[in-house]
Amino acid sequence: MFLAALLAGCAGAGSGGPQPGGSTAANAEAPTCGTEPVVLNATFETGFDLPFKLSEEFTRQYPNVTWDIKQDQFQNLINATPRLLSGDNPPDLIRLPTMVSLVKDGLLKNLDGYAAGFGWDKWPAAQLAQNRVATDGTRGSGSLYAMGLNYSLTGVFYNKELAAQVGMTKPPATMADFDAVLAAAKGKGILPIMVWNASSSGGGLAFPLQQLMAAYGPTQPINDWIFQKPGATIDTPSNLQAAEHLERWIKAGYFPTDANAIQYTDANARFRGGEGLFIFNGDWENANYDKDMAGKVGFLIFPPKEQGGSVAAMSSPLTYGIAANAKNAGCAAFFFNWVATNEQARKINVSVGGSNPGGPADLAIPSVASGSVTNDTLAAGAKVAESNGAMDFIANATGSIFAQGWTPELQKVVGDRQGAAGLLTAVQAEYKRELEQGS
Amino acid sequence: MTANRTVPAASRPTRSDQRPASWLARRVPRTRGARRAALAGWLFVLPALLMYAVFVLQPLALTIQYSLYRWNGVGPATWVGLSNYVTVLRDPDLLGTVINSFKLVLFYSVVPVTLGLLTATVIHRVAAGRFGSVTRTVLFLPQVIPLVAAGIIWGWLLSLPGLVNQILTAVGLGDTTRAWLGDFDTALPAVGLIGIWVLLGFCTVLLLAGMSKIDPALFESARIDGASWLQEFVSVTLPSLKYEIGVCLTVTVVAALAAFDIVYVSTGGGPGNSTAVPGIQIYILAFLERQVGLASALAVILMLLVIVMILPIQRLSREDRS
C-alpha cells in the first residue's frame, strides 16, 4: 500500500500536460549572455567536477552571469528530468540521461537555430549525431536537441606492471593477440579482466561485449539498434559470434568469479589496487586511475579482428540540454559554444574531464601532463575518429534496456543459466517489448 | 483451557472495554451533550483524517486511476481499460517477482516470528534481569539502523572478500565461500538473511512484551500440574500471544511483499531476476521505462496481494474478540 501511495504521489507531481514550443525550429541566431545580470538555472550530475569547474570559469570571464546549480545522482536524474523540465522553473541547462521521450513530449529546446548561428553544423558531424532526434523518434539524425560538454571514449585500461609480467610489451594488434595475453595472464595466476556486473551498477560485461561486436561486425547496425531505427535487431550473426566469444572468456575464468556481486566502484577500486590486468572502461575514470596508479596505467583501443582492420569504441557526448521553456536559453546556448571553443574552457575540459572537448575540427586539443593516461585516451580517440568507429553504448538504446535486458541476461551468462544465443534473443525480445509498450 | 478464556482479558482490551463505545454510538443522536461530544471527537480526528486523505487515500485513488491508462508521466494519457492488468498477469517476468516475494515471506516472516518466539521464551524464562534487557536491546538495534545502510553493510559482509567468507575460510569451510549476493542459488536466501536480522529483534521485543503480560499464576499452575516446557509453551504461552503473533505476522508479511530498500541496495534484483521483487519492478517500470500505467497496475495488484495475505492473519489473531 505504501508503494502504491508513494508511486502515485511521485507520479502525481509531474502530471502537467504536454508542453508546447519544444519542437519548432528556430531561425539562425547566435545570442550572448549580454551585460545585464543573468542567473543560469542549472542541474548537474553529482560526482563529476567538470560542469562545476566550467561554470566557475564562465563566471570569471562573464561576471554578469551567476549560477543557481542543483545537483543529483545520475540515477535520480533519470526519474526527475521530465518533472524538472515540465515544472514551473525549467532549467536553462540540464544533464540529460535520455532524450527521445523528452523530445516527443516537447520538453527540450530545439537547438537547430543556435547550431546554424554559431556554426556548430560545420563541426565534425559525428559529434552532434547522437544528440539529434528525427520526427519519427529515432536518434542519430534530425533536429539537434542537446550538446555534449565533451566526448568520452571507452576502451581497455591496463595495468603496466602486470602487463610486463605477462610479456605484453605493446598493445595487442589483433583480437587473437588480445586472447593470447588473456591466456598468458590466466596462466600466471593474474586475473585477466576486472569487471563489475552487479545489478545496482548495471552489467559492465556489456562493455567487452560491445567491443567484441564491433570487432566481429560493422558498427552501423549497432548504432541503428541503439538509435531505434525501424527493423533494427541486435540478434545478428556477427553479434552472436561476439557473444560466443564473451562466453568463452567467462568460461575460461578471465573475469572474477564474483563478477555478479561486484559494483562499479568496487571493480575500479580493485583494479587500482592491482587486481586485474585489464578493465574495460571509459576516459571519465582517467583522473582516478592517474591518482592511484600514476604512470602505471595505460589505455588501448580494443584491437580489430584482422591486423590493420578498423578500430571502434563507444564514444558518447556528456549530454546537456536546454528546457523548452527555459528563461535564459540564449545564454545557455552561448555557454555551449564557449565550452567547445574557449581555450581556457577546453583546457579545463581535458584536465578535469579527461575527455575530448570536441568543437571545430581545426582547434587543437589542449596538452596534458606527460605520463597521464589522458594522453593515451586522446590519441586513441583520434584513431577511432579516423576509422569512423564511434558507437553509442548498447545500454542506452532504451530507458531500461540495461536494467531489464543486458544486466540480468549477462548475469545469467556468468551464472551459466544463459547461452550466447539466448542472451541476444532475450535482449532483442525485451527491446521489442519496451518499444511496443513505451509511449 | 482456562488460559484461553482468562488471559486475553488480562492482556488486552476486550468486549467489556468495547461496550461503552458501541453504546455511545447507538445513543449519540439522542442527547445534545452526546452530540457535542461526537462533534468534538470528529474535530480531534479531523487533522489526522485530512493528512490520511491527502497522503494515503488520494494517492491510492490516483494509482488506481493511472493503472487504467497508458501514460509516460508527462505527455497525454490514453485510456486502456484493464489491459495493463492483463499485461502484468501475462508477463512471466512480472509474475516471477510476485513469486520471489512469496519466497521472501518465509525469511521475513516465518523465520523471525518462530525464532522470535523461541528467543522471547528463553529470555522470559531464564534471563529476566539485566542480561535479558541487554539481549533485547542488541536484538532490537537493527530496527534503529536505516535499511539502506544495513543493505550496504551486509553487501560488504557477504561479498567474496567479505567477513562472512573470511570466517568460513578460518573455520575450514573455504570450499563453501562465494559471493553470496551474486550467486543465483544463494542471493535470495542471503537477502532473506538480512531481513531476518532486521525483523527478529522487532518480533522478539513485541512477543516478550506480550509474555510479560501473561498472568504468572498460569505458568505456576501449569508447572504444578506437571506440564513440560513444551506443554507450557503450547497451552499457555502461544494462545496468550495470539494477538502479538498476529501483529508480528502482519508487519513482517507486509515487509516481505512490499520489500524494496534492502533488495534494491544489496542486489538490485539480481543476479538475473533471482531477487527481483514487485517493489523493484514498479520502480523500474515507473521511473526507468516511464510506464506509469503498467507500474500502477502492478502496484494495485501488490496492494491486493498484501490485503489477501493480511486479512486471514488479522481474522485469526482477533477471532475470539467478536
Image (cartoon, coloured by chain):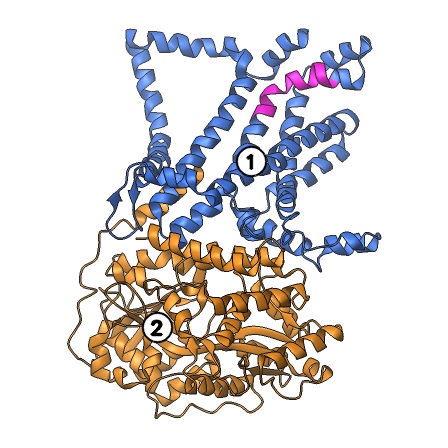
Chain colours: A orange, B blue
| Lateral position of residue A104 relative to residue B282, left or right | left
Mark 1 in CB contact with mark 2 (< 8 angstroms): no
Q: What amino acid is found at the position of numbered circle 2 in the picture?
A: Gln
- Image quarter of residue A262: bottom right
| Lateral position of residue A405 relative to residue A142, left or right | right
Farthest residue to the right: give it.
Answer: B172
Q: Position of residue A144 (x, y in %)?
A: 27, 73
Q: Position of residue B110 (x, y in %)?
A: 63, 31
Q: Which residue is mark 1?
A: B102
Q: Which residues are magenta?
A: B233-246
A44 or A262: nearer the viewer: A262
Residue A417 visible (yes or no) = yes
* SS of the residue under disc 2: loop
Residue A316 visible (yes or no) = no
Q: Kindly identify the residue that appears in the image at 58 percent across and 82 percent down.
A: A174
Q: Which residue is mark 2?
A: A130
Magenta stretch mostly in which secondary structure?
helix
Farthest residue to the front: give it.
Answer: A237
Rendered view: A254 above or below A312: above
Could you say which disc has been placed on residue A333 in the image? none
A85 or B5: nearer the viewer: A85
Dot 1 alpha-carbon crowd within 10 angstroms: few under 14, some 14 to 19, many 20 or more: some
**Quadrant of image for the N terminus of chain A:** top left
Q: Position of residue A276 (x, y in %)?
A: 66, 73
